[in-house]
Amino acid sequence: MSRFFIQLAYNGAAYCGWQTQPGLPTVQQTLEEALSTLLRQTVAVVGCGRTDSGVHASDFYAHFDAQVADPEMLTFKLNSYLPADIVVYRIFAVRSNAHARFDATARTYHYHVSDRRLPFRQGLYARIYFRPDLDAMNEAAQLLTTYDDFTSFAKLHTQTKTNICHLSHAQWTEEVDGWCFSVRSNRFLRNMVRSVTGTLLDVGRGKLSIDGLREIVERKDRCAAGVSMPAQGLFLCKVEYNFDSLMQNPNNNTDEVY
């Protein structure tokens, strides 16, 4: 039995998030059923995070333990078996203690908005009804990188032990048909990106000042922040690892640390 990482992407519109839930379609359940069928053994998959219902991932990692003779062939078979809204990019062997969630060093999310109707991007962005002030939103985004306690943007009553996150990047950019908010951190709280985005958009339409944003962060009160944006505009787009430390020793295939 060996441990493998699987790199995949999915359109989350048809799923109630990543994590398996009784009686509901999820990405984890779909992937586990496909792996178990193809490998003819029960396979449990551990994801790098837990995206909510309707959230997408253009870069996602998970790990599983199984006997796999040919990872490339398994990748091909999975893509033939899985529904069209899930794609597997690669499967590769890692150390027996490698963990898709805990070994991730950083994650980057993108949130897409537009003030126009985009029929060919339905379910992939959130509609807004004003033209935001990009400079003001970027000033506000940079302010967020000076804080590390994001209690004001965390979903209430979760089992999270700490609300400390270290944002290393937060920026709005203009796209051809809208705007994108990109944010990178070592970790994120549940619903954090969507509530941060909604609050920054309040700045962008003149409803909230920079000083007002500072007050919201320092109050550490979720009720003080802006609305949580809809799920469909959110993408987990990059998960980072120190892959050299995760890979198996190609010479002896042992778990010796080096």
Image: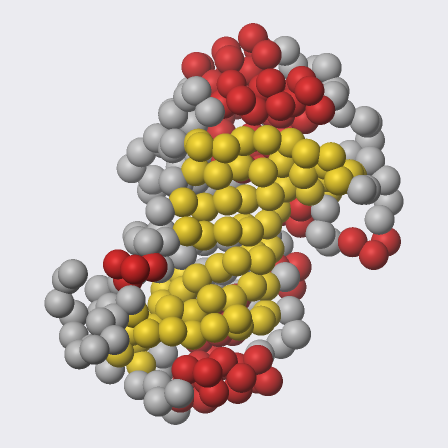
Residue 211 lies in what quarter of the image?
top right
Left or right relative to 113: residue 37: left
Tell me how the rendering is colored: secondary structure
How many marks the image carries: the answer is 0
Q: Tell me, yes or no, if residue 45 can be seen here.
A: no
Residue 14 lies in what quarter of the image?
bottom right
Q: Residue furthest top?
A: 211
* Image point (56%, 56%), residue name: 57
* Image point (51%, 66%), residue name: 8
Residue 63: x percent and y percent? 36, 67
* Image point (81%, 26%), residue name: 131
Q: Residue furthest left?
A: 256
Residue 256: x percent and y percent? 13, 67
Left or right relative to 70: residue 236: right
- The answer to whether residue 179 is above or below residue 81 is above
Which quarter shows the C terminus? bottom left
As rendered, which of 239 and 151 lies closer to the eye? 239
Which quarter shows the N terminus? bottom left
Q: Tell me, yes or no, if residue 111 can be seen here.
A: yes
* Image point (49%, 29%), residue name: 153
Residue 71: x percent and y percent? 41, 82
Residue 168: x percent and y percent? 44, 32
